Image (cartoon, helix red, strand yellow):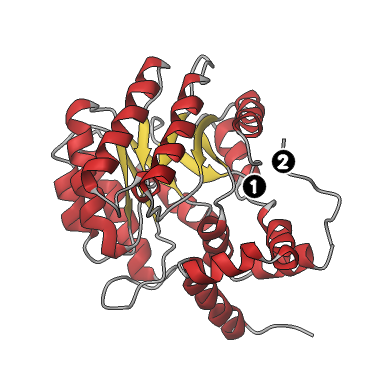
Amino acid sequence: MTTSAPDLTRAADNLRAWAVDEQLKARTMADPVLAGLAHRVARRYIAGETIDDALAVVAANADRGHLGSVECVGESVRDEATASAQTQIFVELAARLSRPVPPTISFDLSHVGSLLSPTLALENARRIAVAARESGSSLMISAEGSDRTDLVLDLWERLNDDFPDTGVTLQARLHRTPADLRRVMERPGPVRIVKGAFGEPKEIAYPRDSEPMYDAYLNAVDALVAEGRRVNLATHDASLVERLLPRVGEGAEFEMLQGLGGDLLDTLRADGRVTREYVVFGREWWLYVLNRIAEHPGRLVAAVADLTGGDQSRQWRR
């Protein structure tokens, strides 16, 4: 039996809705059977649960010539003690970054308390930034849903005042991004351009992989390149990479998520391009994993294979 493209697209849309359904997440992770099945799918996309797991993958990627970015995955924290505990994990991670070119540290501001208090989130982000600076690293602030974009940019600007090497992520899909890009370009720091994985209505965002979205992505990159800004081209889309190559200099970074773009990233590195692999670890992987699957409906097939034991021998990547 085959699954039609429209059915896969509808399933992907459902996954995006599930990704932000915190009650569904809680019910699933509280059920031992469902939690076990969810972990079986997640391990394709996650380095493991610990800092050691993540750093082992970062080291292996460095041996292949790739820079690193690492994140303890999580989002939408609504408890101050949890936000503090998660911040401490990032601080401990930063203290252990000792490679000649240490990976950058990425995270959602909602992971460190922005939904509780912008002031709390800024304090926690600054703690991480100080630890990263001491290790020779820097931060990259991740994008969140469009309803949080103003908050993300406001906090990034305040953090960037004291840590000007702190980068920020913009979603090409959002209609508002050209204006946000002009705002971001008034300050220093790298800019990461992504397509945008969140479920958004057509009034707010272009459909993923539509020609207007591709145009918006390329236009954003053109603007950054023209200003001589460091730009992180975060995509696994080979057709988009092909369109980007003649538009960017050799200093532009091609960034791909661990497990999703290895062969393409290796090819780019062999061609002399700067490449970076994004490694994720931790226990709060729900939103991250569902969004990774939903980005490309064909990944649902791999998820079904994982659920049915098609790759039972694989453990957390180490």
Q: Which residue is identified by label 1?
A: 259
Q: Nearer the viewer, residue 249 or 276?
A: 276
Nearer-N-terminus badge (2/1): 1
- Looking at the figure, which quarter contains the N terminus? bottom right
Give the residue type at disc 2: Arg
Looking at the rendered structure, the number of numbered marks drawn on it comes to: 2
Using residue 293 as the reference point, say whether residue 302 is left or right of it: right
Q: Nearer the viewer, residue 147 or 206?
A: 147
- The residue sitting at 30% across, 55% down in the picture is 115
Using residue 35 as the reference point, say whether residue 163 is left or right of it: left
- Looking at the figure, which quarter contains the C terminus? top right
* Mark 1 secondary-structure assignment: loop
Give the residue type at disc 1: Gly
Q: Are marks 2 and 1 in contact (CB under 8 Å)?
A: yes
- The residue sitting at 21% across, 63% down in the picture is 176
Counting other residues with Cα less than 10 Å from the Cα at mark 2, is it few (<14), some (14-19), or many (20 or more)?
some
Give the number of the disc on residue 317.
Answer: 2
